């Protein structure tokens, strides 16, 4: 019997490669499999991963040691200095020279304009200029230093250039005869991100990954702070604050050493954004956690190389339209006060359901007349900017058939916690693995000895699904 570590490595490599080959359009495949054979291999791998998931997870979590390429990485500080105290969040941006010009300066301007002075005290912006052209490095660093001198002086902005150390990059990636343009792009991007994250691992508690062509929504730092506070005691690997492939993803810095090593294990063939989803899966997060609305948006331009090698990124903001709120029944063990009933919270109006003296275990459950593929869910509690009457601690769960005698679902899975009395999140489905939703439940997780308003429950259904 093989050692657990080797079973883990074989299973991880097989899962990554198989899932990538099954779900991505591949231009150059050296070993082709028939469709039926692919399906058989996939089924075998799923069974293997399921049967040994605990061993794989524990072994993967023990892969703490950084790659030799990062242990001996060389960095040059081009502008600024590291913060003197550890911050809440590092905003990490990797940038290269683009033939059609750069949005890097606009991206940095957006970061600082969209964050207040108090918010900026909890972040550090780390820019990794990864292009090897010395003249471009000098000119770009000079432009940043001139335009953002106050932020550099305050140690809010740090500009670096990094090079991997140790042995050469695996796969002879610098040899054009052995590397396709897309493979070179994938590998270069992952090395750049790995160097960025490696430097950032001790600067803060959390890390936000951004590309160099992004603009930010106002008060994005506060939005991330409150989301992190709500998710603090719940399991997660990546929180997504944008529909973009790379930008807007938040990690714990304690996971960065594993992530950077993971990137360098699969330098060729697989783009970084696909590896991110596999990374979160291997650490136990089976579906993306996408918080809405989006906080980060592309400036709206594309580069030729990226267009050729990547599928187009999804819409910045999905045009959801009005909520569907399908026919449903309502069940709660919360006390109704103020002549209100549970249905009021589900109506498309200014009405609400009023309750008080809530305790952990109190529930508000919406049971659909039939199962639906739900795309987005929104719960609002309280009223006004002062957020009076809002539910401080609660979480939203999805329920599935069968339905018990008291008309509630027998099985529930966590979707996410309320953030400052609000909940707005996307629901992901993997065809063949995730069932349609029958129940949506708001669960109270802490005592509330005051009046609470539950209002504006909004449910969006996937078109053509039901």
Image (cartoon, helix red, strand yellow):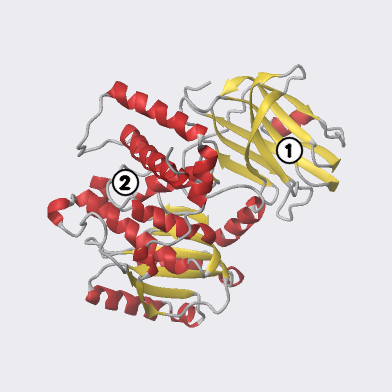
Q: Dot 2: few (<14), some (14–19), or many (≥20) neighbours within 10 Å?
A: many
Horizontal side, residue 445 vs residue 75: left or right = right
Mark 1 or 2, which is nearer the eye?
A: 2
Marks counted in the figure total 2
Q: Secondary structure at mark 2?
A: loop
Of residues 250 and 270, which is closer to you in this image? 270
Mark sitting earlier along the chain (1/2) = 2
Of residues 147 and 466, which is closer to you in this image? 466
Horizontal side, residue 132 vs residue 66: left or right = left
> In the rendered image, which residue does mark 2 sit on?
270
Q: Give the residue displayed 33% in from the left and 77% down from the top.
A: 141
> In the rendered image, which residue does mark 1 sit on?
443
Of residues 5 and 39, which is closer to you in this image? 5
Q: Position of residue 62 (x, y in %)?
A: 51, 53
Report, in whole angstroms, how far the alpha carbon at label 1 lies from the one at label 2.
40 Å
Q: Give the residue displayed 25% in from the left and 37% down from the top.
A: 26
Q: Dot 1: few (<14), some (14–19), or many (≥20) neighbours within 10 Å?
A: many
């Amino acid at each position: 019997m093989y050692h657990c570590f080797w079973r883990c490595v074989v299973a991880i490599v097989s899962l990554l490669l198989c899932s990538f080959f099954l779900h991505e359009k591949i231009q150059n495949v050296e070993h082709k499999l028939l469709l039926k054979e692919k399906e058989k291999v996939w089924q075998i791998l799923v069974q293997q991963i399921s049967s040994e998931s605990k061993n794989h997870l524990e072994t993967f979590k023990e892969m703490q040691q950084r790659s030799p390429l990062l242990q001996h990485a060389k960095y040059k500080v081009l502008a600024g200095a590291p913060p003197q105290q550890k911050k809440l969040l590092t905003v990490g941006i990797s940038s290269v020279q683009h033939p059609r010009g750069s949005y890097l300066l606009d991206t940095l301007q957006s970061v600082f304009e969209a964050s207040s002075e108090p918010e900026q005290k909890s972040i550090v912006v780390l820019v990794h200029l990864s292009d090897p052209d010395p003249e471009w490095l000098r000119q770009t660093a000079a432009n940043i230093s001139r335009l953002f001198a106050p932020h550099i002086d305050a140690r809010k902005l740090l500009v670096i250039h990094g090079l991997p150390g140790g042995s050469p990059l695996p796969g002879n990636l610098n040899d054009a005869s052995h590397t396709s343009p897309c493979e070179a792009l994938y590998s270069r991007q992952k090395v750049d991100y790995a160097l960025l994250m490696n430097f950032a691992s001790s600067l803060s508690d959390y890390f936000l990954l951004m590309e160099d062509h992004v603009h930010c929504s106002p008060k994005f730092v506060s939005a991330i702070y409150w989301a992190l506070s709500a998710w603090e005691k719940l399991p997660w690997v990546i929180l997504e604050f944008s529909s973009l492939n790379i930008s807007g993803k938040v990690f714990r810095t304690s996971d960065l050493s594993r992530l950077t090593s993971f990137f360098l294990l699969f330098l060729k063939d697989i783009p970084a954004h696909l590896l991110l989803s596999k990374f979160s899966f291997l650490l136990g997060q089976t579906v993306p956690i996408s918080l809405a609305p989006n906080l980060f948006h592309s400036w709206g331009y594309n580069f030729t190389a990226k267009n050729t090698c990547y599928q187009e990124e999804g819409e910045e903001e999905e045009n959801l339209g009005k909520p569907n709120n399908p026919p449903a029944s309502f069940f709660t063990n919360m006390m109704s006060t103020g002549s209100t009933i549970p249905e009021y919270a589900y109506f498309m109006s200014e009405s609400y359901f009023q309750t008080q003296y809530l305790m952990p275990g109190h529930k508000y459950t919406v049971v659909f007349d039939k199962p639906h593929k739900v795309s987005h869910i929104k719960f609002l509690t309280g009223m006004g900017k002062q957020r009076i009457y809002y539910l401080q601690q609660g979480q939203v769960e999805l329920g599935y058939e069968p339905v018990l005698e008291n008309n509630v679902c027998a099985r529930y899975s966590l979707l996410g916690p309320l953030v400052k009395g609000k909940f707005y999140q996307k629901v992901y489905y993997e065809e063949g693995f995730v069932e349609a939703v029958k129940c949506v439940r708001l669960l109270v997780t802490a005592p509330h000895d005051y009046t609470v308003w539950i209002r504006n429950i909004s449910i969006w259904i996937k078109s053509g699904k039901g």
